[in-house]
Amino acid sequence: MENLRGKQKHYLRGEAHNMRPLFAVGKNGLSQEWLAQLVGALDKRELIKVNILQNADVTTAEVKAAIEENTSITVVQTIGRVLVLYMPASHEDDQHYSLEVDKL
């Protein structure tokens, strides 16, 4: 997990504003397989939104804690039942947001 400064979080929140949630947490909750898919998607995209469905057995705080404890993903923002997640890509070709974040 990366510690982001205020300017960096502000930039990422702005970039995520028009995004639609790419992942959802349902009644199956959080599994290692789901977390692995999340890491894989973030390694390509760097910034995504996750929606916590109404029928989920976990709270937003529990999802946030599980993601931050078990992965290197940073939770940039929590808006109701939606989380904005960020993780720098490992391949240079996929690095779009991380280059801008490093400049800030």
Image (cartoon, rainbow, N blue to C red):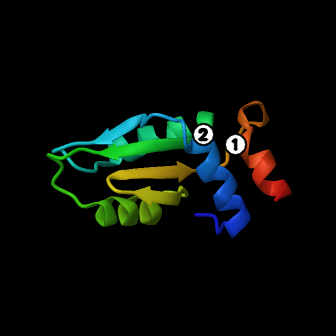
Query: What residue is drawn where x is 22% and y is 49%?
Result: 29
C-alpha gap between disc 2 and disc 1: 6 Å
Query: What type is the residue that disc 1 sits on?
Result: Ser
Query: What type is the residue that disc 2 sits on?
Result: Asp
Q: Quadrant of the C terminus?
A: bottom right
Residue 15 appears at what percent x and percent y? 63, 43
Label 1 CA crowd tier, 10 Å (few <14, some 14–19, many 20+): few
95, above or below 3, in the image: above
Q: Are marks 2 and 1 in contact (CB under 8 Å)?
A: yes
Q: Relative to residue 29, is residue 2 drawn left or right?
A: right
Query: What residue is drawn where x is 46% and y is 43%?
Result: 49
The numbered dot on residue 90 is: 1
Choose top left, top right, bottom left or bottom right for residue 72: bottom right
Residue 100 appears at what percent x and percent y? 79, 48
Residue 103 appears at what percent x and percent y? 85, 55
62, above or below 38, in the image: below
Query: In terms of secondary structure, where does tag 2 sit?
Result: helix
Choose top left, top right, bottom left or bottom right for residue 27: top left
Residue annotated with mark 2: 43
Whether residue 87 is visible, yes or no, is no
Q: Relative to residue 12, is residue 26 drawn left or right?
A: left
Q: Which residue ends up furthest to the top in the rendered image?
A: 93
Label 2 CA crowd tier, 10 Å (few <14, some 14–19, many 20+): some
Choose top left, top right, bottom left or bottom right for residue 21: top left
56, above or below 63, in the image: above
Q: Quadrant of the N terminus?
A: bottom right
